[in-house]
Image: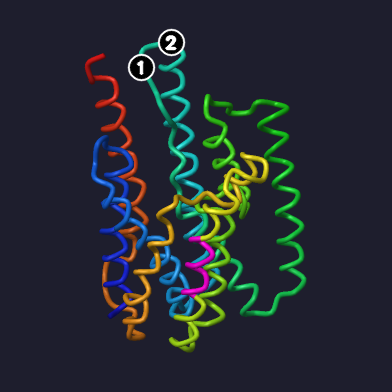
């Protein structure tokens, strides 16, 4: 199975999951299927990194689209918040979706690891500390871009600053990307590593979520109880045949934010047109 076909499968699972997220009263199995998407997309980043002819250009493209979606989300959130404050509409949550951000961070980290850039890895670690405190200061002290939902504001700054904690999926999806990078030359090792990772994802909601400071645990472990179902993406990942495949290079970059915005506004319309 080529990289392009893997992306199509992941894209389909993602759309089904987002329909279940934004549209009320969808069956639970929409979310179960959606658990396949993230690990496949992360694996495709490893493939893309290996096949690209220009690594820096590849990473810049990822960041530019992640940055653009972060700005787009915040603009929409501010507009929606304005009408909410005027009591023109009811809003139950704001846009936080931006999976391009963790994909960029995975790509950046594997480049630093691949090129053995120890000095820059140290810089990256220091920047994570600085950007975390900078985000907290901007949100808590200065109330910059504040919304009724702190998560959306923190996720915006996490995208802009490239912070592994304040990104969709949290730090564990970044760890999964590094795991794929370290094991991708041997499918058996990929399988063992992925199974162990899925087991950890199964245990976390049972043991720790909500048990270490509430908000902190939700940032570190932002997973649903069904996230372990990502284990069923493994057979698809193992079917990858080494071919990059052919397909629209920028399709996902464009489709991803567009479908999120459309579904979000459908959600708001349904929410505000429903009889009280």
Percent of width and height locating residue 141 = 73, 27
Mark 2 to mark 1 CA distance (whole Å): 8 Å
Nearer to the camera, 188 or 144: 188
Is 70 situated above or below 13? above
* Quadrant in the picture for the C terminus: top left
Instruction: Name the colouring of the figure.
Output: rainbow
Nearer to the camera, 207 or 23: 207
Picture residue at 28% right of the left edge, 48% below the top? 28
Q: Is residue 60 visible?
A: no
Q: Is residue 172 visible?
A: yes
Picture residue at 37% right of the left edge, 56% below the top? 253
Nearer to the camera, 146 or 195: 195
Q: Which mark is residue 54?
A: none
Other-residue count near label 2 (Cα within 10 Å), few / some / many at <14 / 14–19 / ≥20: few
Percent of width and height locating residue 261 = 33, 39
* Quadrant in the picture for the N terminus: bottom left
Based on the displayed image, in which of its 4 quarters is residue 4 positioned?
A: bottom left
| Secondary structure beneath label 1 | loop
Question: Which residues are the magenta region?
Answer: 194-202
Is residue 77 shown left or right of residue 157? left
Percent of width and height locating residue 147 = 54, 26
Q: Report the predominant secondary structure element of the magenta stretch.
A: helix
Percent of width and height locating residue 216 = 65, 43
Magenta-drawn stretch contains 53 = no
Disc 2: which residue? 86
Is 36 situated above or below 135? below
In this view, which residue lies farthest toward the front? 206
Picture residue at 60% right of the left edge, 42% below the top? 157
Based on the displayed image, in which of its 4 quarters is residue 215 positioned?
A: top right
Disc 1: which residue? 89
């Amino acid at each position: 199975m080529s990289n392009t076909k893997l992306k199509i499968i992941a894209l389909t699972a993602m759309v089904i999951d987002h329909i279940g997220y934004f549209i009320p009263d969808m069956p639970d199995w929409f979310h179960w299927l959606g658990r396949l998407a993230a690990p496949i997309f992360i694996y495709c980043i490893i493939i893309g990194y290996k096949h690209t002819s220009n690594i820096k250009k590849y990473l810049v493209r990822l960041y530019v689209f992640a940055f653009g979606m972060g700005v787009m989300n915040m603009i929409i959130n501010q507009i929606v918040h304005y009408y909410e404050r005027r009591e023109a509409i009811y809003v139950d949550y704001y846009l936080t979706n931006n999976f391009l951000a963790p994909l960029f961070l995975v790509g950046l980290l594997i480049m630093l690891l691949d090129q053995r850039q120890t000095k820059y890895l140290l810089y990256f670690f220091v920047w994570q500390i600085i950007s975390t405190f900078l985000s907290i200061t901007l949100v808590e002290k200065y109330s910059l871009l504040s919304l009724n939902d702190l998560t959306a504001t923190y996720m915006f700054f996490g995208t802009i600053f490239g912070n592994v904690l304040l990104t969709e999926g949290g730090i564990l999806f970044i760890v999964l990307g590094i795991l794929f990078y370290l094991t991708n030359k041997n499918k058996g090792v990929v399988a063992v590593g992925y199974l162990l990772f899925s087991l950890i994802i199964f245990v976390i909601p049972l043991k720790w979520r909500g048990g270490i400071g509430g908000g902190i645990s939700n940032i570190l472990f932002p997973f649903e109880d069904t996230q372990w179902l990502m284990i069923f993406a493994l057979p698809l990942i193992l079917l990858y045949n080494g071919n990059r495949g052919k397909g629209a290079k920028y399709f996902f970059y464009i489709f991803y934010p567009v479908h999120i915005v459309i579904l979000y506004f459908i959600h708001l319309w349904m929410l505000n047109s429903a009889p009280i």
